[in-house]
Image (cartoon, helix red, strand yellow):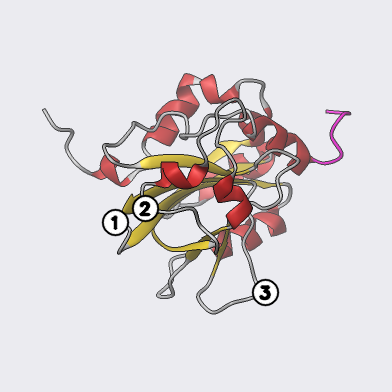
C-alpha cells in the first residue's frame, strides 16, 4: 500500500481494473454498461451525479457504473456506485448522499468522456455504446437516474458493527474494505454473488 498516497487512491487503482460491467451482473438485451469512474488518470472528465438545477454540489463516487437505457427521445440510466469509507463520519456523509428522497438524481456524462473509447485498445467511442445517442455529442449527456445501487467498503471494525446493528436500505450493499483493495477482487465469487443481487432484475422470478 506504500505506493498509494491514500486509501481512496488504492481503491480507485483496483477499481480501474474492473470490467465495464460490474462483476456478477448479467448482461441485458439492448442495455449497455459502461464504467464511468474511475477512468484513466489521463481522463479529461468523468461522469458525476448531481441534483437537478445544482451547478456546484456534485457527488463523485469512488466507483460508478452506468447502465444506459430507454430511447433517444426518453433516455435514462441505472447506476451502480462504490464508496470506500475510511471513517464512520465519512460513511455517514456518503450514505446521506444516496438516501431515499423525493428529489431526482441526475447523471452527467462530459463530452470528452463520451468521445473517448471505453477500452483504450478499441476505437469505438463511448457515445456509440450508450445506445441513446444518434450523433456525436457536442454537449454533456444529462440523464435521470432510474435506479441506483450502492456498495460501501468499510474498515473491519465498522463493518462488524454495522452487520450486528444496522438494517441496510434496499439499495445498499456492504463489504469489508479488503474486498475492494484486493488484487483481482472482481474475480472473487462471493463478491460477484453479492453484486449479482444489486439489480432490479434480482427482485423478479428468473425466466424459465
Residue at numbered disc 1: 71
Tell me: 166 left or right of 206. right
Report x, y in % for residue 186.
Answer: 54, 25
Residue placed furthest toward the front: 135
Q: In the picture shown, does residue 208 fall above or below 85?
A: above
Task: Please name the predominant secondary structure of the magenta segment in the image.
Answer: loop
Q: Secondary structure at mark 3?
A: loop
Q: Are marks 2 and 1 in contact (CB under 8 Å)?
A: yes
Q: Secondary structure at mark 1?
A: loop
Q: Which residues are magenta?
A: 1-6
Residue occupying image coordinates x 67% and y 74%: 56
Q: Secondary structure at mark 2?
A: loop
> Distance of mark 1 from mark 3, alpha carbons?
29 Å
Near mark 2 (Cα within 10 A), the count class, few <14, some 14-19 or many ≥20, is: many
User: Which comes before the other along the chain, label 3 or label 2?
Assistant: 3
Residue occupying image coordinates x 59% and y 56%: 111
Q: Quadrant of residue 201?
A: top left
Tell me: 198 left or right of 20. left
Near mark 3 (Cα within 10 A), the count class, few <14, some 14-19 or many ≥20, is: few
Residue at numbered disc 3: 56
Q: Which is nearer the eye, 164 or 115? A: 115
Report x, y in % for residue 74.
Answer: 30, 63
In the rendered view of the protein, which quadrant contains the N terminus? Answer: top right
In the rendered view of the protein, which quadrant contains the C terminus? Answer: top left
User: Which comes before the other along the chain, label 2 or label 1?
Assistant: 1
Residue at numbered disc 2: 132
Near mark 1 (Cα within 10 A), the count class, few <14, some 14-19 or many ≥20, is: few
Q: Which is nearer the eye, 161 or 70? A: 70
Residue occupying image coordinates x 55% and y 32%: 123
Q: Are marks 1 and 3 in contact (CB under 8 Å)?
A: no
Q: Which is nearer the eye, 29 or 155? A: 29
Amino acid at each position: 500500500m506504500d505506493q498509494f498516497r491514500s486509501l481512496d487512491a488504492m481503491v480507485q487503482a483496483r477499481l480501474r481494473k474492473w470490467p465495464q460491467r460490474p462483476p456478477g451482473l448479467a448482461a441485458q438485451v439492448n442495455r449497455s454498461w459502461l464504467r464511468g469512474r474511475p477512468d484513466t488518470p489521463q481522463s479529461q472528465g468523468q461522469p458525476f451525479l448531481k441534483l437537478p438545477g445544482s451547478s456546484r454540489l456534485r457527488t463523485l463516487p469512488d466507483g460508478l457504473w452506468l447502465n444506459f437505457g430507454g430511447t433517444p427521445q426518453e433516455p435514462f440510466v441505472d447506476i451502480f456506485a462504490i464508496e470506500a469509507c475510511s471513517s464512520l463520519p465519512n460513511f455517514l456523509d456518503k450514505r446521506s448522499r444516496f438516501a431515499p428522497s423525493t428529489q431526482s438524481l441526475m447523471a452527467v456524462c462530459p463530452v470528452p468522456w463520451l468521445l473517448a473509447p471505453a477500452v483504450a485498445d478499441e476505437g469505438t467511442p463511448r457515445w456509440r455504446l450508450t445506445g441513446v445517442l444518434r450523433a456525436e455529442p457536442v454537449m454533456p449527456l444529462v440523464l435521470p437516474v432510474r435506479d441506483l445501487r450502492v456498495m460501501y467498503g468499510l474498515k473491519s471494525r465498522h463493518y462488524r458493527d454495522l452487520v450486528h446493528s444496522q438494517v441496510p436500505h434496499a439499495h445498499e450493499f456492504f463489504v469489508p474494505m479488503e474486498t475492494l483493495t484486493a488484487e483481482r477482487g472482481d474475480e472473487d465469487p462471493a463478491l460477484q454473488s453479492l453484486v449479482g443481487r444489486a439489480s432490479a432484475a434480482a427482485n423478479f422470478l428468473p425466466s424459465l
